[in-house]
Amino acid sequence: MEDSTRESYVDIHCHCLPAVDDGPASLQESLTLCRALREDGITDVIATPHQLGRYNDSNEAAPIREHVAILNTELERNGVSLKIVPGGDVRVDERICQLIEEDKILTLADQRKIILLELPHEIYIDIEPLLIDLSAMGIQAIISHPERHPVLARHPERLLKWLDCSAYLQVTCASLLGDFGPGPQTAAWHFLSMGWTSFVATDAHNLSGRRPRMNAAFEQISKRLGRALARLVCIENPLRVLQGKDVFFACDVNTGKYPEIG
Ligand SMILES: [Fe+2]
């Protein structure tokens, strides 16, 4: 039976579509992951398959939209009350602005308002020029899991320049809970406690190593940094992305002030 006192979450970063990337390999695996997302308290998911990088020749916007429609039909047929909308986990690439214009890559919830950017893992590159170009198109960026980037975890001050360009940070639930080891865990809590992190998401891929852990992350954030911040990064801001509304920067939690949500 569902616990009605539990929070409901929107997940803005999730690899739940079958057979498109390193997420579920089949529809059955995808349905299993979707059931786990629902059990974790998530009601809405922005499906964010990898785009560009090693998926350069696949995963264009049109087929992803079709995969999302098919999965929604299957979820309904199988009695899983989870709603999926299209998005992408877009590897940083100098062609991004052009590819948005050509409708080849996806913004989050297909709203053409905010894009999820995945940094190259091994090297550090300054993405300020890309952030400026995106901003000129009226599109903001969310940088996915900077806490798992070894250079940014060691040199967090490099993020400040990007935050000044109106980029948002998304930290992964499993990083906060220690699943990626002590380095990413320390960095994730640092970015959150500094008020730099506006989103927490699952980045779930499967039920083995990369499962959704939103509710556990929410509880930990509530305990350590307060329920207002937990609600902002796990519920309010993700919902605003889903609805195509402006989102809020988290503030310095030491001031005790949070944005007015209305
Ligand atoms: Fe991802």
Image (spheres, rainbow, N blue to C red):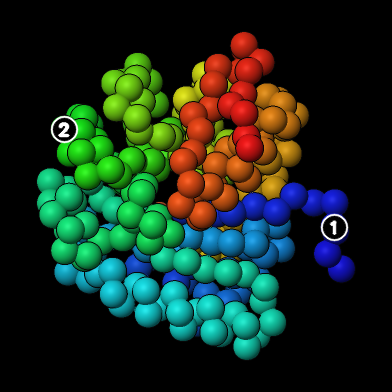
Quadrant of res 154 = top left
- For this orientation, the residue located farthest to the bottom is 77
Q: Mark 1 is on which residue type?
A: Ser
Task: Mark 2 and ligand 1: say if the CB distance to the nearest ligand atom is below 8 Å.
Answer: no
Instruction: Give amino acid for label 2.
Output: Pro
Taking the spot 21% from the left edge, 65% from the top edge, the residue there is 104
What residue do we see at 49% from left, 39% from top?
Answer: 247
Instruction: Say above or below: 127 vs 34.
Output: above
* Residue plotted at (36% across, 47% down): 114
Residue 140 position within the rendered picture, expressed as x and y whole percent measured from the top left: 33, 40
Q: Which image quadrant: the N terminus?
A: bottom right
Q: Tell me, for residue 73, which label it has, or none.
A: none
Quarter of the figure with the C terminus: top right
Q: Which mark is residue 4?
A: 1
Q: Position of residue 3 (x, y in %)?
A: 85, 58
Mark 1 to mark 2 CA distance (whole Å)? 46 Å
Residue position for label 2:
129
User: Considering the numbered disc 2 on the image, is that residue within a helix, a strand or a loop?
Assistant: helix
Residue 220 lies, with reference to residue 94, above or below; the image says above
Near mark 2 (Cα within 10 A), the count class, few <14, some 14-19 or many ≥20, is few
Q: Tell me: 232 left or right of 70.
A: right
SS assignment at label 1: loop
Q: Earlier in the sequence, mark 1 or mark 2?
A: 1
Furthest residue in direction top, as rendered: 255
